[in-house]
Amino acid sequence: MQGDRPIVGTRLIRAWQGVEHTVTVLVDGYEYQGRPYKSLSAIARAITGTRWNGPLFFGIRNPQSGIRNHRSGR
């Protein structure tokens, strides 16, 4: 992770209601389904239809402490 964002090129994968969703980290934001997004929260809302903390939704933030998880290969 660089600062508070994953490294550019990282793919975040999240299953939601039986569908696997993949997000790619870009220099200036994220890409989901071929479209640019400025935040993970906006992508989480597009997927779920409700407000979510994006890093929490994608599993890169610990819900209890707010500490970011460092996972390789995800």
Image (spheres, rainbow, N blue to C red):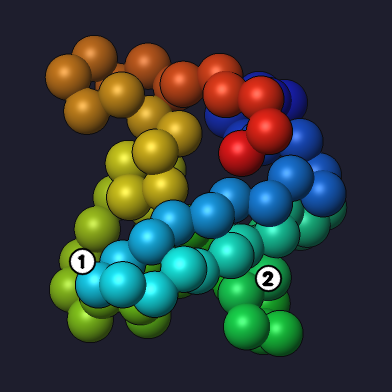
Q: Image check: 63 left or right of 41?
A: left
Q: Amino acid at mark 1?
A: Arg
- The structure residue drawn at horizontal position 46% and vertical position 68%, both measured from the top left corner, is 20
Report how many numbered discs are placed on residues in the image. Answer: 2
27 over 59 or under it: above or below: below
**Residue 8 placement, left or right of 6:** right
Which amino acid, mark 2? Answer: Glu
Q: Where is residue 69 drawn, in percent x and y? A: 46, 21
State the image quarter where residue 68 is shown: top left
Q: CA distance from mark 2 to mark 1?
A: 19 Å
* Nearer to me, 16 or 34: 16
23, above or below 53, in the image:
below
Question: For this view, does 7 lie left or right of residue 21?
Answer: right
Considering only vertical position in the picture, is 12 above or below 72?
below
Say which mark, if any, is on residue 38. none
Residue at 32 percent across and 41 percent down: it is: 56
Identify the image quadrant of residue 66. Answer: top left
Q: Position of residue 57 (x, y in %)?
A: 33, 50
Helix, strand or loop at mark 2: strand
List the residue tagged with mark 2.
31
The quadrant of the image that shows the C terminus is top right
Q: Earlier in the sequence, mark 2 or mark 1?
A: 2
Callout 1: SS: loop
Counting from the top left corner in percent of width and height, residue 5 is at 62, 36
Residue 42 visible: no
Residue at 68% from the left image edge and 51% from the top image edge: 11
Residue 73, position in %: x, y?
A: 68, 33
At 22% across and 28% down in the image, what residue appears? Answer: 63
Name the quadrant of the N terminus: top right
Say few, some or many: other residues with alpha carbon within 10 Å of mark 2 (under 14 / 14 to 19 / 20 or more): some
Image quadrant in which you'd find residue 16? bottom left
Q: Which mark is residue 51?
A: 1
